[in-house]
Amino acid sequence: MPTQKILRLNAQLFPVGAFEAAQYRRYGIQPIEVEADTPTAILAHAADCDALFVISAALPAEVINGLTKCRVISRLGAGTDKIAVDVATQRGIVVTNVPSFCAEEQADHTMALLLALVRRLPQMAALMQAGAYGDAHALSRSNRRLAGRTLGLVGFGHSARLVAQRALGFGMRVIATRRRNLPAMAGVEIADLATVLHQSDYVSLHLPLTVESYHIIDAAALRLMRAEAMLINTSRGALVDEAALERALREGRIAGAGLDTFEGVDVFVADAPPPALSLLRLPNVIATPHVAAGSVESGQDVSAGGVENLVAILRGSWPRPGNVVNEGVVPRWPLTEYVPP
């Protein structure tokens, strides 16, 4: 491959690890590592790049329009709502991702949040530390058994299907919405959103953030949920109207929430003061800072997939099927059918 300028953003917040560095050596590329979080700062380094790796930095239209040579934006992750994909398509820039790199981890984290809420683990841990054993025993007697309860999945892609497998193992009933004509799954009922919200004891979100899915869980949706129901979100924060969720929790219209992702909190900073979002201080909310994807294995999967996507395009072929976000793009340079690198 001829010498080409490859930029890798988020170099300090998400530094290159040993496995990712090994992928670069494998393909003979040397990305320039940059930490920049504004369009001006990004373009100071990226304007003349041939290819761009990104993890969490936003790439709005201003950045995309300033990329004069770029052939590919390789998202080292799954979601691309921070990238102006439509502008990239107009400019002939292929946007790629690794869509299912952390599906197992997301499913594990979803079940962890659900179990922590159901078994009231934060409260039990606090009562244990306080020596309030009697209070803990009394609280435990109002817990509900998972077997026979209903889990509703909003979206039925890879992570949701893995959550369904786990939930079925607990003896739960599982119902789900389905946006596309995905294959059926034994034991899972397909229903519309209103039915899923109304019938579920626990609702878990598994959708990308789009214009259509923005605030899909709003005040009206929350009113459809049962008073004893709980909401889990490990997907994208803006799927939920956080102000409406806080009101529903304070008023007792739903029982709890487990959140790993937020619209009102930027968790992609190394050091920050405690979040100002009052929702997170409610006793029936368990929150984690967008860490559902994290594991050794998922890190390796996303590095391998993201690097392979970029290298394929720079070598003149499409990446692995399913890894192109803007499938209708006409690339700046013609590409052949996918060839494994």
Image (cartoon, grey):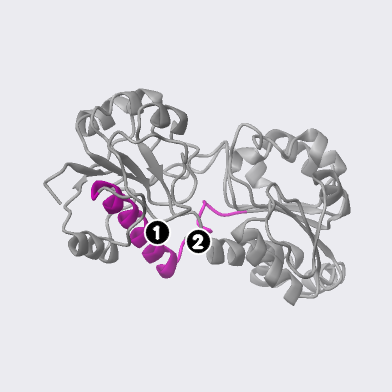
How many marks the image carries: the answer is 2
Task: Give the residues in magenta.
Answer: 287-315
Could you say whether the residue bearing mark 2 is in a helix, strand or loop?
Answer: loop
Residue type for callout 2: Cys
**Circle on res. 102:** 2
Mainly helix, strand or loop, the magenta region? helix
For the C terminus, the quadrant is bottom left
How busy is the neighbourhood of tag 2: few (under 14 within 10 Å), some, or many (20 plus)?
many
Give the image location of residue 3, x and y in percent: 11, 46
- Report how far apart the C-alphas of labels 2 and 1 lie in the structure: 8 Å
Give the image location of residue 23, x and y in percent: 25, 62
Residue type for callout 1: Val
What residue lies at 29% left-to-right and 53% top-to-bottom? 312
How busy is the neighbourhood of tag 1: few (under 14 within 10 Å), some, or many (20 plus)?
many
Which of the pair 286/162 is nearer the observer?
Answer: 162
What residue lies at 38% left-to-right and 51% top-to-bottom? 76
What residue lies at 51% left-to-right and 58% top-to-bottom? 100
Which residue position is annotated with label 1? Answer: 302
